[in-house]
Image (cartoon, rainbow, N blue to C red):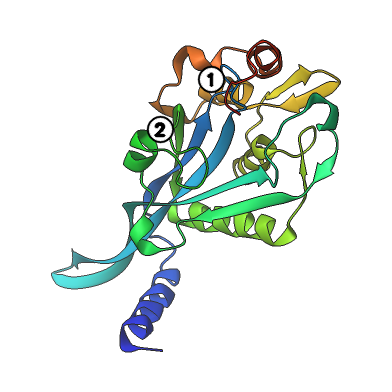
Amino acid sequence: MNLKRYILVLLFLFFLLQPEVKSYANVYIVFYATYQGKTGHVGIAVSEYNFVVLEEVINGSKIEKIDTQANSELLYYDFWPNEDQFSVWNTGKNIEGVYYKLPIAKENEITVSTLYQKGIPHKEYYPVDGILKISTTWSQDQQLRKILDKKIVLNKPFNGRRYNCCDFVIEVLENQFGFSFKAKEFIGLGWSSTPNKLYRSMKDTPGFMIIKDAGNKMNGTFFGQRVIYKLFNKKAAH
């Protein structure tokens, strides 16, 4: 262990011994709309932090405290089917899923700005349609990351009906913060959580703030914008 890493470990341990210190940041929910043949998607991004030393004068003496401060970088998680080819007939089947935790390399940093202007870096390659945020603390974010990392290790299969990209995000937020979302809509043979319905439900949930408004793109149903649209527009994007 080099000296720099050793110092960071000591700072981290020292910080843990100071529970009264709270640092505030945000968790971002990232949306692509189900719109004009596109399936849509949902992911979640958690703030990254720097350790900072704060000075406080108490009874004439300077006291140093270690705090955390959210920086502009984000740790992004999402969940995809291994083969991203939607069909009404296979939505209830388990298929292999792929869990992402990005960025892999420091130079490929993800920020609100990159999501806003460029989109997620591994799949869609165009700006996201909507971004919502909730305010959190450092300790909440660390717990959230543990939950997300555990989901990656468990490697639960993708199921369009019971466990898709929306359910991945919903489970984490409901378990951690006690939210309750109405994200299900009827698609062909049963009910599934969908990006558009989840966006509308989250947007109306107290505690969520709109960073990028997806507007009317989120008003359509999955059946209408994805299933029916594709029937009449064979060349539409997935």
The C terminus: image quadrant: top right
Which secondary structure lies at badge 1?
A: loop
Position of residue 88 measured from the top left corner of the image (x, y, whole percent): 80, 25
* Rendered residue at 51%/26% (across/down): 206
Counting from the top left corner in percent of width and height, residue 147 is at 63, 55
Mark 2 and mark 1 in contact? Answer it, CB < 8 Å.
Answer: no
Instruction: Give whichever of 17, 143 is nearer the camera.
Output: 143
**Of residues 134 and 95, the one drawn nearer to the viewer in this rendering:** 95
The answer to which image quadrant residue 106 occupies is bottom left
How packed mark 1 is, by other alpha carbons closer than 10 Å (few <14, some 14-19, many 20 or more), is few
Which quarter shows the N terminus? Answer: bottom left
Q: The residue under label 1 is which amino acid type? A: Asp
Q: Quadrant of residue 68?
A: bottom left
What is the x, y in percent for residue 24?
A: 38, 48
Looking at the picture, does residue 194 appear above or below residue 76? above
Q: For the point 63% across and 14% down, which residue is it?
A: 233
Between 118 and 66, the residue placed more toward the observer is 118
Mark 1, residue position? 204
On residue 163, which mark appears?
Answer: none
- Please tell me whether residue 216 is drawn above or below residue 112 in the rendered image: above
The quadrant holding residue 201 is: top right
Task: Give how far across and how far down residue 25 sits, in percent.
Answer: 38, 47
**Depicted 24 relative to depicted 49: above or below:** above
Judging by the rendered image, the residue that carries numbered circle 2 is 127
Q: Three-letter amino acid code at disc 2?
A: Pro
Q: How many other residues sit within 10 Å of disc 2, few (<14), some (14-19) or many (≥20)?
A: some
Q: Distance between the residues labelled 2 and 1?
A: 23 Å
- Residue situated in front as seen by the camera: 206 or 70: 70
State the SS at label 2: loop
